[in-house]
Amino acid sequence: MRKTTAFVGMDVHAETIAVAVADGRGLVRSVGTIANRPEAVRRLVGKLGDPADLRVCYEAGPTGYVLFWQLTQLGVHCDVVAPSLIPTKAGERIKTDRRDAEKLARSYRSGDLTPVWVPDAKHEALRDLVRAREAAKEDQLRAKHRLGKYLLRYGQRAPDGCRAWTSAWWQWVRAVELPHADQKTTLLDYILEVDHQAQRIERLEGAIDRAIAAAPAQLRTIVDALQALRGVAKVTAVTLATEFGSFTRFERASQVMSYTGLVPSEHSSGAKNRRGAITKTGNSHLRRVLVEAAWHYRHRPRLCQRQKDLQRTLPAKVSAAAWRAQERLHRRYWLLSNKSKPKGKIVTALARELVGFVWAIGTETEQRLASATH
């Protein structure tokens, strides 16, 4: 006779893991706290019983998915749950590791937790590389702002007609003379920091190119298909592919829009319908690249040379979906613009619809590859 399934909640920290178990319909009991080490987790699983009868969950966080991979290798079913979607009581004012573990076990047993998609080790490595490049771009922007504001503080202005960050502008910056030696040292440090960030971005982009070349054929095919969309070049396509992970895990386009946090917030009651700004509760990396890509649709529909070259290798459905996206989003941009909507809101609305086309192309490509392998 098969034993009752035990639902285990783990409150994971860098050094410790608080554990609680909910058996069947009984009370939730605390098992205690163990060290966050592979051998301690292995001993815990042995004490809890048959791995096939265990269901373990813990919150997604800075500790990553190492515990998930270890438990999976031990034959234990594990779910990593979204922390922001864990039910909380309004009157709770006491928070401890033991209580958090018990709440996880109780909510897991009742089915109130929302699991997140967990990548494999190779997929996460590529995603880390893409996010490192994004962080380098943010650092470069801060370094540029720091340099520009430093020059402005001392009244140093570029010659008329000299655009910032061009080669002519850099020649002027490197020739700037400040009266004090300390000022010169600071200016040189700011210049070197901008150069350092540019080299860092170049190095990471080269690593991304090599990683894509060595990636599985399925991922390369999805990256190529996504580049059929306007405003989606290689880095953006890789970001979309790595952050989504699997497009077929979403059943509808509306779910993808919610996942990116691009849907409007709502507080409606009775006959009143109130909608506010976008929720921003989803994947911020996806949201950023989608908004950047959406700006391109203010221009009339056309294919650049890169897209024309891709058309020869892409399926007809993918090419048709990308062209429909250009026509629809361009038309919608000017429709909203003629209503005097702010450009920021217009582009956000376009990004919300663009992710629907991204999902359609990604799903079509994954389904086609799956049918080809069977």
Image (cartoon, rainbow, N blue to C red):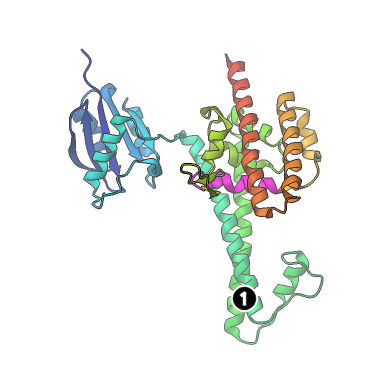
Could you say whether the residue bearing mark 1 is in a helix, strand or loop? helix
Is 292 magenta? The answer is yes
Is 180 magenta? The answer is no
Magenta residue span: 280-295
- Residue 373 placed where, x, y %? 58, 16
Q: Viewed as shown, does residue 122 lie left or right of 308?
A: left
- Which quadrant holds residue 173? bottom right
Within 10 Å of disc 1 (Cα), the crowding (few <14, some 14-19, many 20+) is some
Q: Main secondary structure of the magenta part?
A: helix
Residue picked out by circle 1: 150
- Residue 179 placed where, x, y %? 65, 87
Q: Nearer the viewer, residue 168 or 152?
A: 152
Query: Residue at left 63%, top 66%?
Result: 144
For the C terminus, the image quarter is: top right
Q: Nearer the viewer, residue 88 or 123?
A: 88
Instruction: Name the kind of residue labelled 1 in the image.
Output: Tyr
Q: Viewed as shown, does residue 92 lie left or right of 320?
A: left
For the N terminus, the image quarter is: top left
Residue 206 seen? no
- Which quadrant holds residue 351? top right
Q: Residue furthest bottom?
A: 179
- Which quadrant holds residue 7? top left
- Residue 67 placed where, x, y %? 34, 37
